[in-house]
Image (spheres, rainbow, N blue to C red):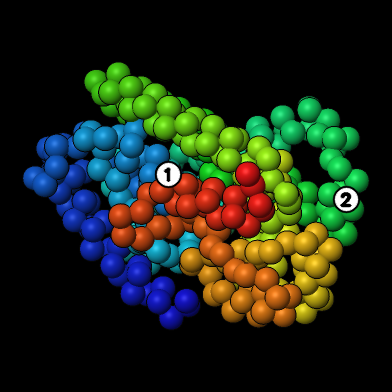
Amino acid sequence: MTLRTPLIAAASLGTLLLAGCSGAEADGEASPESDASLTVAAAFYPLQYVAEHVGGELVAVEALMPPGVEPHDAELSPAVVRSLQTMDTVLYLSEFQPAVDDAIATTDARALDAHHIVDEHAAAHEDEGHEDEVHEDEADHADEDGHDHGSSDPHFWTDPTLLAAYAEDVAAEFAELDPAGADTYAANAEALVAELTALDEDFQAGLASCERDDIFVSHEAFGYLAERYDLHQEGVAGLDPEAEPSPARIREIRELVAETGATTVYSESLVDASAIEALAADAGVQTAVLDPVEGVTGDDDYIAVMTRNLDALKDGLGCS
Ligand SMILES: [Zn+2]
């Protein structure tokens, strides 16, 4: 993974420099290869997905993470960092990718931070008195692991309704930068919200009646999804996939798999699956992919990956 970083940074540099030369520096003319009114950078995939859908033809979206790259600890080359200054805005999530936080701070680029969605969710969570509603066994898990899905969990996009909230944000940012396109951005956002709402309804219906509600995952990217659909996640690694799981944690998960009668443990596509595969072999259960949608490849998109996730959950949890 670490060895690939310089190549990746160089690859995105090419497209970013192209955008920089043709856009901001050519006396306000639209770049020859597009009629876009705005050029924006998206720090990782779900933000890019929203930017592309809300922006439509009017916005050229530059991905800071090339396809299939795990974004948590990704680095940016100095040239990519400098290129942020040519963007109309940078869509990012603070406290998720330290390299992006630093790049925005050093370039003083205009940026839209999605972190308020995480904060508002955490605040709403407290107002609802959710702690009191947690089942006895879930409370025990939370206590012994110290995982409370609090404000430190960045993965808001695993709840489609929170990604829908983000779409409204992005539409407002684009409208402020390009008032002539405001109606288009609002209509595009509305269409995206409708798609995400339909996805949420599929999850509600698909997970309404299941034999089990514990999901065993590679890194704890599914806290918001679990909360939305009344599941409980246990991660071999914590919130950051690069954290090495301890042998004690792996033993603990192994015991929980046996206790809960789980038939499946979930790996993910962008993180080494060997710890999960060894755990599954040891426990005599199968593995399946539950993708945190932190990066996608090929023709995949958010809806496609999340739909596969729903199928994988229905299979693994014995949903009827
Ligand atoms: Zn993650």
Q: Residue at x 33, y 27 (%)?
A: 188
Residue 125 seen: yes
Mark found first going from the N terminus, 1 or 2: 2
Badge 2, how many Cα within 10 Å: few under 14, some, many 20+? Answer: few
Toward the viewer: 31 or 218?
A: 218
Q: Residue at x 52, y 36 (%)?
A: 202
Q: Which residue is mark 1?
A: 303
Q: Quadrant of residue 120?
A: top right
Circles 1, 2 touching at the beta carbon (< 8 Å): no
Residue 279 coordinates in the image, percent (x, y): 69, 76
Q: Quadrant of residue 124?
A: top right
Residue 85 coordinates in the image, percent (x, y): 33, 48
Q: Kindly identify the amino acid type of the residue bearing the numbered disc 2.
A: Asp
Toward the viewer: 11 or 70?
A: 70
Is disc 1's CB within 8 Å of ligand 1?
no
Residue 305 coordinates in the image, percent (x, y): 45, 52
Q: Residue at x 74, y 33 (%)?
A: 125
| In the rendered image, the vertical position of residue 80 relative to residue 95, given as above or below | below
Residue 95 coordinates in the image, percent (x, y): 59, 52
Badge 1, how many Cα within 10 Å: few under 14, some, many 20+? Answer: some
| In the rendered image, the vertical position of residue 114 relative to residue 244, given as above or below | above
Q: Residue at x 33, y 74 (%)?
A: 7
Q: Which residue is mark 2?
A: 137
Q: CA distance from mark 1 to mark 2?
A: 32 Å
